[in-house]
Image (spheres, rainbow, N blue to C red):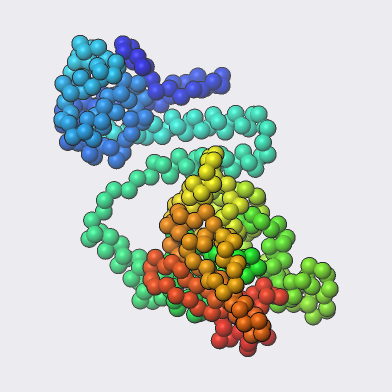
Amino acid sequence: MAKGNFETNSLALTDPFMIKQLPYSMEAEQAVLGALILDSERLTSVVGILSADDFYVDKHIAIFASMQELSLQNKHIDAVTLVNSLVNKGVYKEEGAAAYFKQLAEAVPSVTNCVDYARIVHDKALLRRLITISEEISRSAFEGSEPVQHILDAAESKVFALAQGFITHDFIHIHDIILEFYKEQLPLLQHNKDEARGIPTYFSDLDRFIVGMTAGNLVLLGARPGIGKTSMATNIATAVAKNKKQAVAIFSLEMSRIEMVTRILSSEARVDSHKLRSGDLQDDDFARLAEAATALSHVDIYVDDTSNITVSEMRAKLRRLKNLGFVVIDYLQLMSSDRRIDNRAQEVGEITRNLKILAKELQVPIMLLSQLVRDTEKKGRKPMLSDLRESGSIEQDADMVFFLYKDESGGTGENDNIIECIIAKNRHGSTGSVKLGWEGRFTRFGNLDTYHEEP
């Protein structure tokens, strides 16, 4: 950190064409600092807009950081306390600091415009970071060492992350929120209750219980292997695409896209999934498959079978989809975090937190499938929240948690076609369970009251 001449919070730009001065406003940086020296009470309005790293001049970074430190320590902010803080840090010599603070105070056109000066500094910082990201993208493109799609996904993810980082929300008075409710939600409650209830599962008993999946919610679906969690998720996704005319996205980390679509075709055509894989099909099977394939080709279902995908990669891909209504991720334990974390439980925690943030950003429900710990495979034991593998933050971040349970204790086969859906967590209502009809050979769930009547 320099003590005499101005040094800048420069961003390393090594490419020959990056020879222009990075955007910043000396006048705005000096004005906002000078205004805060004259009226430190305005700091509370500025900290929601600026961070120290938003300043370009190194000394300004140090000055603003010292202001924040003094504020956190409940100390008064003025020229004397700031000089003492900066001299102790070695940023300034005492005589130089006092002279510069006088210059800052004199450079303020109007203290009342402090927030406006802060926004100028903020915008210039955004432009500098955008330039840095652009350089990184250009370097990746010139090197060409990664697949083009990876470079495109990384570029979109970086720009989106930058934009999201600069979106801030302040306190809003309840009066204004009530007006927003009356404008946006009340008409739905009066005239279109289905829309107000969120995305339905299309299992009537379950929908009556949970009142739909709310936009922005993270819904976790857990079950031991072979109980049908993938089938239930794809059944819901297909129903949403067909009935609500919205796009749905399925991230299939375990199965290939062909395997995933084979399951969907089996369910929609009511063709035995084993026969579909083995090719042992009859003429009527082919006819039903053709009919189902034609119908499915006209709905917006997108399948991505990238292994070890990260949340940032998902975000980049999902933002390209129009009219998105629902997302399925199969399954959590196969995902990777965006940074290296040695502790797997912590890594899973970061993934679920980021997925919750993603659901809120996109304003769609995300259904996240999860494995359970092996103890739940013991007969007669229904799954609980503590059975979520690498749990902890999983149950904390999820708005709803569903478990699928099949009672195999009878031994007579009378429960083979019934699966219990346990609502173990419901942030918006009560917990409990409902029973669903299960046609395993068609990988298809149904409402229990109509299950035996379906052809």
Tell me where residue 385 appears, x and y as whole percent: 47, 63
Q: Identify the residue at horizontal 66%, vertical 39% (top origin).
A: 148
Q: Is residue 234 above or below residue 337?
A: below
From the viewer's perspective, tell me whether residue 265 is left or right of residue 100: right
Q: Where the C terminus falls, by quadrant? A: bottom right
From the viewer's perspective, tell me whether residue 311 is left or right of residue 264: left
Q: Quadrant of residue 292?
A: bottom right
Tell me where residue 435 appears, x and y as whole percent: 54, 79
Q: Is residue 14 above or below residue 406?
A: above
Which sits in the foreground, 9 or 452?
452
How many numbered marks have been drawn onto this rendered protein structure?
Answer: 0
Which sits in the foreground, 400 or 391?
391
Tell me if I can see residue 379 in this picture.
yes
Q: Quadrant of residue 7?
A: top left
Which sits in the foreground, 217 or 434?
434
Tell me if I can see residue 292 in this picture.
no
Q: Identify the residue at horizontal 43%, vertical 29% (top origin).
A: 128
From the viewer's perspective, tell me whether residue 119 is left or right of residue 384: left
Specify the farthest residue to the bottom: 453
Which sits in the foreground, 243 or 386?
386
Q: Where the N terminus falls, by quadrant? A: top left
Q: Identify the residue at horizontal 39%, vertical 65% (top origin).
A: 427
Tell me where residue 416 appears, x and y as whole percent: 65, 80
Tell me where residue 135 appears, x and y as whole percent: 54, 29
Q: Quadrant of residue 51?
A: top left
